[in-house]
Amino acid sequence: MAEIIWTSNALTDLSEIGEYVATDSPKYAELLVAKLYHKVEILVTHENIGRKVPEVDKENLRELIEGNYRIIYEIVNNSVFILTVHHSSRVLLIKS
């Protein structure tokens, strides 16, 4: 079983998503952030379930899709690091 570790960058992404959506609907913002946060729970037992990130040719860099969002994560040994939660309409920049 893998350990899920949220990076500060990914937690900031969630917060910013929530703040942005809350300008129209605080309730939907709360539901969306919770949905994105809990989406990664499957990675505890199935860390390779996400597809490889197409922009980067690395086997251990993967993503889950939830609605219009990409949850980018990296598998390192027995840990899964959530790197970013990214809206799919934006250009993805990943620092190596």
Image: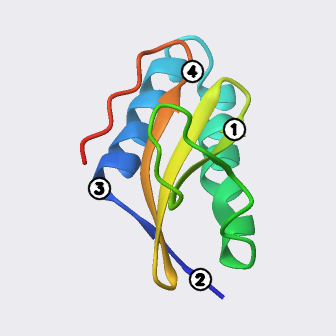
Cα–Cα span, label 4 and label 3: 20 Å
The amino acid pointed to by label 3 is: Ser
Residue 88's quadrant in the figure?
A: top right
Element assignment for label 2: loop
Label 1 neighbourhood size at 10 Å, few (<14), some (14-19), many (20+)? some
Instruction: Give the number of the disc on residue 88.
Output: 4
**Camera-side mark, 4 or 3:** 4
The residue pinned by badge 3 equals 8
**Which mark, residue 65?**
1
The residue labelled by disc 2 is 2
Q: Is residue 73 above or below residue 35?
A: below
Mark 1 vs mark 2, CA separation in Å = 19 Å
Secondary structure at numbered mark 1 = strand
**Picture quarter containing residue 38?**
bottom right
Callout 4 environment at 10 Å: few (<14), some (14 to 19), or many (20+)? Answer: some
Q: Are marks 1 and 3 in contact (CB under 8 Å)?
A: no
- Secondary structure state at the residue bearing disc 3: helix
- Numbered badge on residue 87: none
Q: Residue at x 66, y 88 (%)?
A: 1
Q: Residue at the front extreme? A: 57
Type of amino acid under label 2: Ala
Residue 49 horizontal side relative to residue 24, left or right: right
Expressed as whole percent of the image width and height from the top left, the position of residue 85 reads: 48, 39
Looking at this view, is 67 or 59 the one in front?
59
Q: Mark 3: few, some, or many residues within 10 Å (few <14, many ≥20)?
A: few
- Are the residues flagged by discs 3 and 2 in contact, CB closer than 8 Å? no
Q: Position of residue 10 (x, y in %)?
A: 39, 48
Q: Is residue 25 left or right of residue 58?
A: right
Inter-mark Cα distance, 1 to 3 = 20 Å
Q: Are marks 1 and 4 in contact (CB under 8 Å)?
A: yes
Q: Tag 4, which secondary structure?
A: loop
On screen, residue 8 above or below 85: below
